[in-house]
Amino acid sequence: MVIEYNNNGELTMGGTSLKTVAQSFGTPTIVYDETQIRTQMRRFHEAFKKSGLNYNISYASKAFTCLQMVKLVQEEALELDVVSEGELYTALEAGFDPQHIHFHGNNKTKHEIQYALESKVGYIVIDSLEEIDLIDRYASDVVNVVIRLNPGVEAHTHEFIQTGQEDSKFGLSIKHGLAIEGVRKVKNSKRLNLKGVHFHVGSQIEGTEAMIETARLVIQWLKENDIEVELINLGGGFSIKYVEGDVSFPIEDGIAEITEAIISIAKETGFPIPEIGIEPGRSIVGEAGITLYEVGTIKTIPNVNKYVSIDGGMSDHIRTSLYDAQYEALLVNRNDQADETVTIAGKLCESGDIIIKDAKLPSTVKRGDYLAILSTGAYHYSMASNYNQMQKPSVFFLKDGKAREVIKRQSLRQLIINDTK
């Protein structure tokens, strides 16, 4: 994605003036570079093709989903990972082939299991022993399942987005015997077919070491227990660049390292390499999206701080409050030098409603200016809420100089549509 200032001093995305977008469609608005999204998907495809292995790439819906996003995923020949009834419903309404949908979740309800079975999804990812019995009970035909393993590998990332460590709500522990018990239960069930195994070590993972270490552990475990599978799903969690110092996962080199390691491990152990799956989400849409805001109140506390408030906040940008995540901001409507450190704050009634704590902005920023917060394509709209009865923002895809609305701004009426009088 190319973000740069044009000759008029206006910030542009792929050549489109973001000032024009903000003025035309209002703020807050999340804008995606559609070409960048497609490019990321194609990079993963090309990297795996070079490996010579059988593979599948499944987009993680939780990063960002809507009807048009699902259609784009299908056009680029990716499969789809869903974690709720709502995500499955969205995918089906978009016309996505259910055979290429995988249903995840650590606490699937009985209704969700039934819905997934009725929809004939490609496979269900088992996350608990009890779930095996539930699926077997409700299934009317043979169902493909994949067991999510807890490998006991800790990734170097924020504790809230680690998922593969021993103390995790996700998966069946290899170390404590739950994984092998799960395999036995599936094999003894009436209607379940063990298609494969799945693991996920965490999110915002910059390197390949944890994934390779876990793949080695899993393959050795499969070999030692004489478990044959058609699929090993490595999960996702590939990193993106939010601020200077962050590293975007090197797709080409990273996938090459992972696949070469798997080939080597398979040779060492004598284990036949099955189909390899991954589930990227953030790395596909994260850097392709930005959020546009309008500046409102500017409050200077002498010798303490300067607050620049915007017309959104933690209702559409929760990750700073939740993870202490860091972001970069740019002034949209003119290219002035960023010569001052300020705090960019939201408008919600919470002291913790902060977008960026130490943002570099021009000292000329004033009410009515527009700001762009970069790398907000993942876990922003999908984590948006109506706290303070804030309306969820509109979302646009930009391509070839044109803006295409993919999600309308939530109306005031929609805020109370489910209320009773």
Image (cartoon, rainbow, N blue to C red):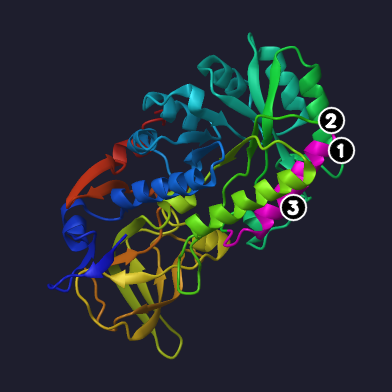
**Quarter of image, res 272:** top right
Label whose residue precedes the other's in the sequence (1 or 3):
3
Q: Is residue 65 left or right of residue 127?
A: left
Looking at the picture, tell me which residue is in the foreground, 294 or 148.
148
In which quadrant will I find the N terminus?
Answer: bottom left
The image shows residue 292 at horizontal and vertical percentages of 30, 60
Indicate the secondary structure of the residue bearing disc 1: loop
Residue under pointer 1: 177
Indicate the secondary structure of the residue bearing disc 3: loop
Amino acid at pointer 2: Glu
Residue under pointer 2: 181
- Residue 268 colored in magenta in the image: no
Amino acid at pointer 3: Gln
Distance from disc 2 to disc 1, alpha carbons, whole Å, reads: 6 Å
Q: In the rendered view, would you say 136 is above or below 106?
A: above
Q: Are marks 2 and 1 in contact (CB under 8 Å)?
A: yes
In which quadrant will I find the C terminus?
Answer: top left
Q: In the rendered view, would you say 385 is above or below 2?
A: above
- Stretch in magenta: 205-225
The image shows residue 178 at horizontal and vertical percentages of 83, 36
